[in-house]
Amino acid sequence: MVTRNALLYLSRHEGLKDFATRFSPFKKLTTRFVAGEDIEQTIAEIRKLNALGCTASFDHLNESVTRVEETNEEVREYLRILSRIDDTGIRSNVSIKLTQFGLDVDPELTYGNARTVVADAARRGNFVRVDMEGSAVTQVTLDIFKRLRGEFGIDDVGIVVQSYLRRTETDVRELLKIPARIRLCKGAYNEPPEVAFPDKKDVDDNYIKLMRMLLSSGVYHGIATHDPRMIEATINFVGREGIGKNAFEFQMLYGVRRNLQEQLARDGYNMRVYVPYGKHWYPYFMRRLAERPANVWFVMKNMFRG
């Protein structure tokens, strides 16, 4: 069996993408998790989600960019996305990764790029979520977010935290003082045990603790999970505490547990789906495989069939 760590290792080698896409089952599976390679394909998928009662978050896939011109192109792409959201009337905000805006080049460049996108979103009445990546950039990501939040409103820009990191409870307490809109997820990067909880039970326990902290704060947060136990814990908590369904939103990834997404929307919960697109889909896709081993078996069983 291909291990989670092996898949996470492969996710960092995008050069394998051309080899992998020679196999039609692999390529077919990518369309489950990636909406397409351009904005218009993604808009069509978001329309379908909106029709099911779900909102979306537009996510252009790219990370670890090291050329300044490429970071500038990422900014231009997000400005195009925000313009097209307005033009089409789809219900969607946007999600950005700071390494696609130059974090591996210069934090100040990154801040300037992110600020351009947040300013345009704020002008349009939209919202930008600053995504969280590997632990090596957690602190600088938080630092840049706090600068942005200092300039813009709580409904203009938000941040992501990961329950598998040992530091996250402290980070959440600090972020709630600002305050900030937070997306809570478990985390999908390969981290050492001194940085992240190695045992799933500890990650889950921390997730529930953080979820309760967030939903008790009175701020509109995103509870991002595909785990039915985490969803049940959230629903039970808000029921006990008298927290309204419109006081927060569940969030899931495009193509993951679609039936559950639709059911939560039908049950009256706010449901947002992160919809990724772009040519640099390979690292993202491999991390999704690492999260769900059954998908690996699908690829392996079908890859060499005639």
Image: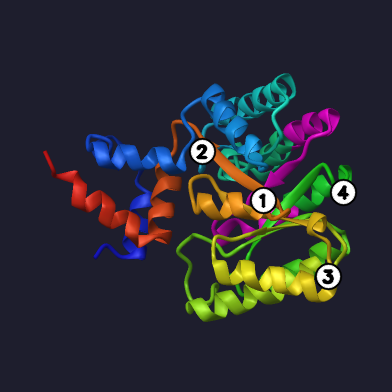
Whether pointer 3 and pointer 2 mark residues with C-beta atoms closer than 8 Å, the reply is no
Q: Nearer the viewer, residue 23 or 171?
A: 23
**In the image, which disc is placed on residue 150?**
4
- The residue identified by callout 3 is 216
Q: Amino acid at mark 1?
A: Arg
| Res 163 seen here | no
Q: Secondary structure at mark 4?
A: helix
The residues tagged by marks 3 and 2 sit, at their Cα atoms, a distance apart of 34 Å
- The residue identified by callout 2 is 62
Query: Sequence order check: which comes first, mark 2 or mark 1?
Result: 2
User: How many C-alpha atoms fall within 10 Å of the one at disc 2: few (<14), some, or many (≥20)?
Assistant: many
Q: Secondary structure at mark 3?
A: loop
Residue 240 in the figure: left or right of residue 52: right
Q: Nearer the viewer, residue 49 or 182?
A: 49
Query: Sequence order check: which comes first, mark 1 or mark 4?
Result: 4
Q: Main secondary structure of the magenta part?
A: helix
The residues tagged by marks 1 and 4 sit, at their Cα atoms, a distance apart of 37 Å
Query: Sequence order check: which comes first, mark 3 or mark 1?
Result: 3
- The residue identified by callout 1 is 266
The boundaries of the magenta stretch are: 115-143
The residues tagged by marks 4 and 3 sit, at their Cα atoms, a distance apart of 23 Å
Q: Amino acid at mark 2?
A: Asn
Whether pointer 1 and pointer 4 mark residues with C-beta atoms closer than 8 Å, the reply is no
In the rendered structure, does residue 142 fall within the stretch colored magenta?
A: yes
Q: Amino acid at mark 4?
A: Gly
| Res 212 seen here | yes
User: How many C-alpha atoms fall within 10 Å of the one at disc 1: few (<14), some, or many (≥20)?
Assistant: some
Q: Nearer the viewer, residue 153 or 248?
A: 248
Front of the two marks 3 and 2: 3
